Each structure stands twice: as structure tokens, then as C-alpha cells.
Image (cartoon, rainbow, N blue to C red):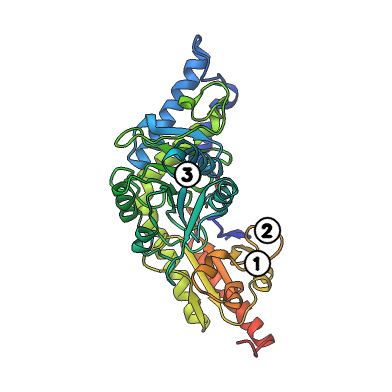
Amino acid sequence: MKLPIYMDHHATTPVDPRVVEAMLPYFSEHFGNPASRNHAFGWRAEQAVETARAQVADLLGARSREIVFTSGATESINTALKGVAAARRPKGNHIIALQTEHKAVLDSLQRLEQGDYRVSYIPVEPDGLVAVDRIARAISGDTILISILHANNEIGVIQPVTEIGALARQHGVTMHVDAAQAAGKIPIDVEADRIDLLSLTAHKLYGPKGVGALYIRRRDPRVEMTPLIDGGGHERGFRSGTLNVPGIVGLGKACEIASAEMATESMRLCALRDRLLDGLRKATDDIAVNGSLELRLPHNLNVSFAGVDGETLLMGLDDIAVSSGSACTTATPQPSHVLRALGIGDSLAQASLRFGLGRWNTEEEVDYAVEKVSRIVKRLRELSPIQH
Ligand SMILES: *Cc1c(COP(=O)(O)O)cnc(C)c1O
């Protein structure tokens, strides 16, 4: 077993060697610009991009023409939210999202609120899931857009996207789904789920950093969206700029692998996750799982250890890469807004660890993590028995 062990796959994933291999020819050999329409170098690059577009579309049950390449989920989200808000402004100015969204959504919406848009942030239940009727009650005649975090990046809970999609469609509201954590991990079907826009990123599914995609529905109904980036009309005008061909090829290959291996991989990771949880429960008392364990990504575990400070715990975990429920976005440790939304108190939120298992984690590594985490938790509790 090699140390340190990586168990932070919600932050990013290593690039699969099969993905690297697929990308390599597109740096120096097939380096053409896919926008070059009159020579073989351009055609070759364009062909590679179109193959990747089909691979991404396949993962989502979409059509190739509905996929636009971006620099990652943050750009896809900004494009979707700001683009739909602008295009649909004549119809209304109200947007709905969850309190537990990723910062890319929350900060984009905050920007819109500085203009003349109004946003309702829907609370979640103590298990992290939203009650669909809360969304139904928030919809008004002014509502133009709903944004839903498909699978949460901290606690891994999976929202009822299909029900919310049906509700949105019924009211003529556009639905955007942030699937940065869900894509390639759980099945997604933009038709069955009635998704209008969907954001994903390659580096969370064993592809390279700095490339992502935005799914934009073209019919039944066609999404109205104003582009964010102008200049040349690439990507059907939705996202100008020369395409990142090697990155796009990598994203496509990563999606192809995910489509083929998702079923077996999720079973393997779920068994590993259960081994981790069972091990921790046996070795330590007073641990709480944050968020629903049933409606959850197979590779996620988020647990709080009562009476323990997460930052101190993390410092003790010098050879295991995980993250805590604080300090995940900034240098100043603050309790996570997600755990807060679940109604978890600050001290228990600070006492949390997020494990994100991945493609190359082993049982041996999980057993090592169980032993090490429980040993440190015990020691910290002995040092401060009052809080416990
Ligand atoms: C990682 C992540 C993002 C941002 O993706 P980038 O490609 O890093 O910009 C957005 N939403 C969620 C849920 C994420 O996990």
C-alpha cells in the first residue's frame, strides 16, 4: 500500500490512464483547430471533437447537438443561470434554488440578485433532501428558472430531480441541474428527468481539469439562453473561443468509460463505503452520518465525531487525504453551509469528515483509514473529555 492515500474524490479525481492515452495525440500530432474548415488538420481535430460530443451526449441520454464544451462546471453553471435569466427576463425575474447548492451556483445567483432578479433558496430536510412540495409552493407566475444540485458535493445526497423536473415542466419553468458530482456516477437521462440544462466537469469523473460541458435542450421545449462569451460563434454561438481539443477528447473518453463501467464501479465503491462506515462504527462510538445514507452517491461518506475538532482531526490524518466540514472553500474555517442547512450544530459540523472514495481505492486502504481515524478520534476525546 502506498502512502499518502487519496480519499478526496469529490474535490477532484486522478486522470484515468486510458483518458491520458486518448488525449496524447491531440497535443502535437493532431494539433489542428477544429474551426479550420479547409484542410485536413482542422478536419481531424473537428472529427475528434464530434466523437467526444457524442460520448458526452450518450452518458446523459442527450443528442450530440445539445452538448456545448466549456472550461468546467463553474463556467457551465454561470452560462446557464445568467444566460437563461437574461433571455427569459421578459417572462419574469424569479429563480429557485436549494440552500445547499455549490458556491458556483450560489455566487452566480447572488450576482443576479444584485440586478433585478429575486431568488428563493429552498431549505432541505434534516436528511439533506428537498421536499418537492416546498418547491411547488415557491413557484409563482414570475418564476423563470429552477437550479438543482443533483448530488451534493459534501454529503453526497441525491435530490429527486425527476419529480422536480416534472413540476418545472408543468409550470413552464426552465430547470438547470448541477451534475458535477452525479455525472458518470449515477444514471442520468435528460429525457426521463425532464432536464433542460445540465452542467458537468471532466475532472470529477477521471478526466482532465479545465474542461466541462453544458447540456442545452434543443426541443420540447427549446431552451432560451443568451451566451456569456462572444467572439466567433463557436459551439453554435453559445460559447465562443478556440476549443480545448485534447481536454475535450479526454472528457469524451472519461464519459465513455463511465457509461461502460458505472454499474460495476458503483457496486464496488458502495461495498467499500459500507466497509468504511461499519469499521468506523465498530471502532468508535458516537458517530453520526450526515445526510441520507440511502439516497446517496455510492462513494461518499460524511460523518461527524462528537466532541472532536475536525481541523485537529485532519492534522492528525497526515497520510490520508480527506476533507472536513469546515474550511472547504476558504482559508478561514467556517462551518459548512450544507451541514448548517441540515440543522446540524456548529460544533458537530466542525467535527465532520468527508470521505470520497474512487476508482483505485482498495479494501486495504479503507482498513488503514478506519484504524487511523478511530485511533486519533479516541486520543482527541481523551484529551478533551468534557465536550464529549
Ligand atoms: C466541482 C464542482 C463544481 C465546479 O466545477 P469546476 O469544474 O471545478 O468549475 C460545481 N458544482 C459542484 C457540485 C461541484 O462539485
- Mark 1 sits on what residue? 334
Quadrant of image for the N terminus? bottom right
Which of these two is toward me, 214 or 244? Answer: 214
Quote the CA–CA distance across marks 1 and 2.
8 Å
Report the residue at 50% width, 38% height from top. 86
Tag 3: amino acid:
Leu
The residue furthest bottom is: 386
Which element carries disc 1, helix, strand or loop? Answer: loop
Contact between labelled residues 2 and 1, with CB atoms less than 8 Å apart: yes
Q: Does residue 106 sit above or below 380 in this rendering?
A: above
Answer few, some or many: residues within 10 Å of disc 3's Cα (few below 14, many 20 plus, some between 14 and 19). many
Quote the CA–CA distance across marks 3 and 1.
27 Å
Point out residue 39 in the picture as x, y percentages from the top left corner.
51, 10
Which element carries disc 2, helix, strand or loop? Answer: loop
The quarter of the displayed image where residue 374 is located = bottom right
Q: Earlier in the sequence, mark 3 or mark 2?
A: 3
- Mark 3 sits on what residue? 200
- Mark 2 sits on what residue? 330
Which element carries disc 3, helix, strand or loop? Answer: strand
Tag 1: amino acid:
Gln
Q: Does residue 282 sit above or below 249 in this rendering?
A: below
Quadrant of image for the C terminus? bottom right
Point out residue 166 in the picture as x, y percentages from the top left corner.
29, 51
Report the residue at 58% width, 65% height from top. 336
Q: Does residue 137 sit above or below 215 in this rendering?
A: below
